[in-house]
Image (spheres, coloured by chain):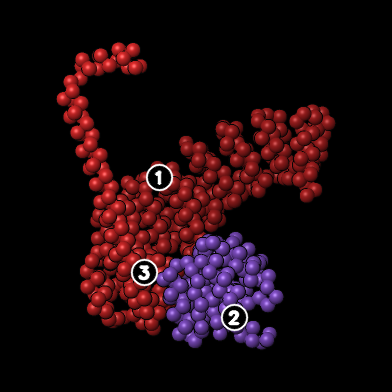
Amino acid sequence: MILLKTGFNDGFARHVKPVYMYGASVVFILVTIALVIATFYTLYIKKKKNSFKKSIGHTLEEWITEVIINESSVGVAVPENLEKLFKKPQARQLVIDELVRNKSSFLGSVSENIINLYYQLGLNVDSRIKLDDSRTHIQCQGIHELCVMEQKDQLQKVYRFTNSINKDVRIEAQTAVIQWYGFKGLRFLDVVSFPITEFQQLKLLELLRQLPFTNFSNFNKWLTSTNDTVVSFALKLAEHYNQVQVHKEAEQCLQHKNEAVRVQAVKTLAKIGDSKTAHLLTLAYEKEKFTNKLNILKELPKIAGDNQRDFLIVQLHEGHEYLKLAAAKVLAKCTSEGMEILEAKSYDTPVPYKDIFLHLKSEAER
Amino acid sequence: MKILIAEDDSLILKTIELCLKRDGFEIICCMDGLDAMEKIEQLNPDLIIVDIMLPYFSGLEIVGKVKQNKNPVPIIVISAMGQQTVVDEAMKLGADEYISKPFNIAALTAHIKRLTSMEEVVA
């Protein structure tokens, strides 16, 4: 009715011949049928894969466990039924997955036996082939397998991926190189031109934390890298490992064009700085934006003293309330008579200094 | 000596089971927290090895529950790398020992022997 009233039906019928409508309906039905068939086919393939996994999973698990808990897995005989099975790529991948999973959980003889079995079944070749695959998730899988199975002879190939255009491949390769060579593996920082994300930086630091510390070789190069994330990461390393010898280079990073680098430089200098660092940070403060101003005030308590009193008193009067509070905290904590200055200020100008003073007083009493 | 192992990864569970069986222990296996809780009540194991991350009941819940009993049995907690805060919590709840993945089966066996010999001395 609505269509008739609006005249839509007339116009529509005039311009679109019935034969086109039939044609469109047929195409629509065909596309729908194709979609339904494709969906069912995908589900069938998935189901087939799963049932294959289930059918051999238990047998494989039993056999793998028997082999890896033995004194030595060298020269182990593969049962006939499994030998045939190992010709299927799906079954081989299943074994790799099981071995990788188990290798990540055990050390000692079990771990050695897992690697021996991986070699003996030629699964290292399967992992190596994955590195040449054009699909990045397969490359990641290959790198991960080689990393867990300690295939250090693949360093050259894996090392190239540390500067891969793909973020995930890069992350996997950088992790592998460090897992294998610890602090020496960080030499990829010399050449990496793509960003190292914050998450990856944290992941690498956590990985390094579990490894025995050896010296850094190219710190100066990293701190002057054209890749800002490398500079940032190097500053983090300097902070975590107290690399006081790069103090001067870290100071220069206070002038870096990238704010994230400058923020990290402040944190690093607060840890490795000398008697002049507090003054340097107060000089840098003037040119900074809000985030790094607050960052400087948060880091200053680690290094500030009476020499910074005048600077801090000025900051009490200027800028955002957060900056005032942060400056007051440093003043109270690091300078003699800091609390007295704040108390006097709270009488002179109660808003906002009375609240700030009371807040710091209660904090000090806690 | 009955040891209950609660671990949701079947291959890891099987590996620990076979290694400890070889050392002469009687092993009870569980793949989730609920099953572990039930078997602890029914079978009274002499020692419990429990993974922190388990379905239904976590390893921490199991430690808490077992250590509330009148005669609590020793518990070894298995944790993944970087779970130190959870491990600290487990120790506060009364876990007797912890071991982080990846671990050496020999180290696990040493913990078991130490804890069970201590139990014998106490008994």
The residue closer to the viewer here, B120 or A190, is B120
- In the rendered image, residues at marks 2 and 3 fall on the same chain: no
Q: Amino acid at mark 3?
A: Leu
Residue at point 38%, 60% (across, down)? A176
Q: Nearer the viewer, mark 3 or mark 1?
A: 3
Residue A187 lies in quadrant = bottom left
Inter-mark Cα distance, 1 to 2:
53 Å
Residue A155 visible in image: no
Q: Amino acid at mark 1?
A: Pro
**Left or right of A347: which side holds B11?**
left
| Secondary element at tag 2 | loop
Residue beneath label 1, please?
A: A195
Residue beneath label 3, please?
A: A99
- Which chain is red in the rendering? A
- In the rendered image, residues at marks 1 and 2 fall on the same chain: no
Question: Mark 3–mark 1 contact, CB under 8 Å?
Answer: no
Residue at point 61%, 40% (across, down)? A296
Residue A350: x and y, percent?
80, 29
Residue A131: x and y, percent?
27, 57
The residue closer to the viewer here, B10 or A54, is A54
Residue A256 visible in image: yes
Residue A155: x and y, percent?
32, 62
